[in-house]
Image: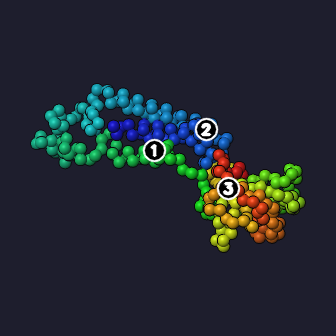
Amino acid sequence: MRRYGPAVLLALVGAAILRVSLFSDLYLRYVQAGLRPYLVVSGAALVLLGVAVAVVTNRADEEPGHGGEDGRAGPGYGEDEGRAGPGYGEDEGRAGLGHGGDTGHAGHGHGPGGPRVAWFLTLPALALLLFPPPALGSYSAEREAAQRAARGVGTFPALPSGNPVDLTLGEFGSRAVYDSGRSLQGRTVRLTGFVTRGGDGTWYVTRLLVSCCAADATTAKAEVRGAQAPPVDTWVTVTGTWHPEGGLGSDAAWPPVVDARSVRQVPQPDSPYEKR
């Protein structure tokens, strides 16, 4: 059975990828929506490869001269209770070169199929198939260093008419810190993200921005004032107005501040990340 370990591992990983990309939207926890076709193709290829490896292994086992799963090959081994012919002792299967016969060989715990412990490699793949990890949250957001590339101060396009206006955390932060036209002044905005906490008791509505996948995620957030903080990692929609602080493009202007009029708990969106 150990011979089929690589085939099982390939099939499990492929099935896990297909589960999150083809049969659900869980892949949006890890990558952008545009990468879905590549995940589906990769998952299908791994499953097919696992099946192919299993077929080849099965045919190899059925060929003459191959032993059973205890790893003993036909030629070169004795026929009497696993005792080898040339180079092996004749007394109760003990080998002349220090290898035991049937009893001693089994003590190694492995044969051509590899050591039994290799089956533990299937556990992470099985866990990924049954229990996909959640999207990144407050822990990842808080680990990011406060280093951001300077974007430069300038004017931004006018916001849509009407209040409140829905903005991503990334757009709200860019306009609050760098917009010389002050397009947020006097406007009511609506921001959706998860809750993170600061060390001084402040709290933020936060979103992770990705270019390709969760591995390159950066943080966009806004400090919320005038409302009690929900539990960390709770998804909320904050409606309020921008509270200017610091000079344009300065460190004092980051993170931007919003004076909350309402904070409403919402379910996590299917796509928890914003595109950077």
Any part of residue 105 in sight: yes
Q: Name which residue type carries label 1.
A: Leu
Query: Which amino acid type is shown beneath numbered disc 3?
Result: Gln
Residue 253 locus on image (x, y percent): 78, 67
Q: Residue under label 2, please give it.
A: 38
Image point 76% across, 63% down: which residue?
A: 260
Residue at (10, 42) in percent of width and height: 91
- Compared across the picture, whether 207 is left or right of 111 comes to right
In this view, the residue in front, 108 or 248, is 248
Quadrant of the rendered structure where residue 204 is? bottom right
How many callouts does the rendering have? 3
Q: Secondary structure at mark 2?
A: helix
Residue 213 % position (x, y): 63, 49
Q: CA distance from mark 1 to mark 3?
A: 33 Å
Quick one: which residue is furthest to the bottom in this view?
A: 200
Residue 197 or residue 46, whichever sits in front: 197
Evaluate whether residue 249 shows in this view: no
Residue at left offset 81%, top offset 63%: 242
Is residue 190 shown left or right of residue 86?
right
3D distance between C-alphas at marks 1 and 2: 21 Å
| Residue 73 location (% of width, % of height) | 26, 34
User: Disc 1 vs disc 2: which is toward the camera?
Assistant: 1
- Disc 3, SS: strand
Q: Residue furthest left?
A: 91
First in sequence: mark 1 vs mark 2: 2
Marks 1 & 3, CB-CB < 8 Å contact? no
Of the numbered discs 2 and 3, the one sitting upstream in the chain is 2
- The kind of residue tagged 2 is Tyr
The span from disc 2 to disc 3 (Cα, nearest Å) is 34 Å
Between tags 2 and 3, which lies in front? 3
Q: Which residue is mark 3?
A: 265
Question: Pointer 1: what residue?
Answer: 126
